[in-house]
Amino acid sequence: MMWKIPEGGHSPLVFIKIPMFLCCGHLDFKHLTSTMDLMPLQASQPFDPSKYRYTGPNVQPRQLPNTRSQAPITTGTSVIGLQFDGGVMIAADKLGSYGSLARYQNIGRLMRVNDHVILGCTGDYADFQFLRDIIDQKMIDEECLDDGIVTRAPALHCWLTRVLYNRRSRFDPLWTTFVVGGLDDDGKPFLGFVDKLGTAYTAPQIVSGMGGHLATPLLREKMEGQPPLSEEAARELLIRCMTVCYYRDCRAFSKFQIATLKAGSIKIEDDLEVKGDWEVAHFSKEHA
């Protein structure tokens, strides 16, 4: 059967039936020349290669775990604390090490929390600043309540164990070790330790960092099996320990602080310095 398109005709019926007869193969193409020229054939359009380029599957990149707290950046070394008759004393140097570079030489790592608690930190200084701001705000909120309840050293020590263990459990630890000193509810000296894993204990003498290997024997020699030290004897012992750490720990520094807490008073000495004696250096082959 033959179909004929009227001259000059562009009726919708023609455009509907043309594809049907193209499939069947019964249409006379001689009569469709003028009409086929009006149809937008794909072959007559310019070729765009970008439409045929394979760009791969649309897959989102895998989210890697958070690693910003997996290693410390600016760090402080040992903190040494001990109990004496009527109070506690904590010492720490003032160096912030950027790796092996003695980058910041005047930063304090001891903190006065309130009239009953002092704090020292070993480890990442940024994490210490983060927790220091939170503790400061807690003390402000406590003063605003004005209910007669104040934070004591055992309470702050317990709170730090929960915070550090929680961050460790979320695989985003605060890379710090704290030495908490103060008086308990009975007015007795308290000294506690807590590290980045939430491990905690209390003892009459506590040393964190490299000083745990260097200063702990000196403290135990003077304190174990002996009556409580006087404040003057405790200060001299801390200075001796800081001197040994300065000689033996490559992350230690000559400038250091000592915080002393007794009933009703807190004193932080900020301008202390080890007077190093290097006259024995000629015994070393490296300096011969």
Image (tube, rainbow, N blue to C red):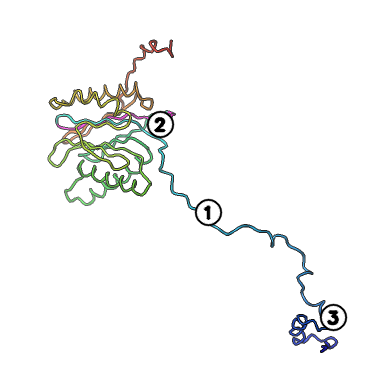
Say above or below: 217 vs 157: above
Q: Amino acid at mark 3?
A: Phe
Tell me how far mark 2 sits from mark 1, CA to CA: 36 Å
Disc marking residue 186: none
> Quarter holding the C terminus?
top left
Q: Classify 10 Å Cα crowding around label 1: few (below 14), some (14-19), many (20 and above).
A: few
Is residue 97 located in the magenta-colored stretch of the structure? Answer: yes
Let me know if residue 5 is in the magenta part.
no
Q: Amino acid at mark 2?
A: Ser
Residue ID for mark 3: 29
What secondary structure is marked by label 3? helix
Residue at image x 43%, y 44%? 68
The label shown at residue 61 is 1
**Residue range of the region highlighted in magenta in the rendering:** 86-101
Counting from the top left corner in percent of width and height, residue 160 is at 27, 44
Q: Quadrant of residue 70?
A: top left
Q: Within 10 Å of the Cα at label 2, are there few (<14), some (14-19), or many (20+) other Cα atoms? A: many
| Residue at the image point whose x is 50% and y is 53% from the top | 62
Number of marks in the image? 3
Question: What residue sits right under mark 2 in the picture?
Answer: 97
**Element under disc 2:** strand
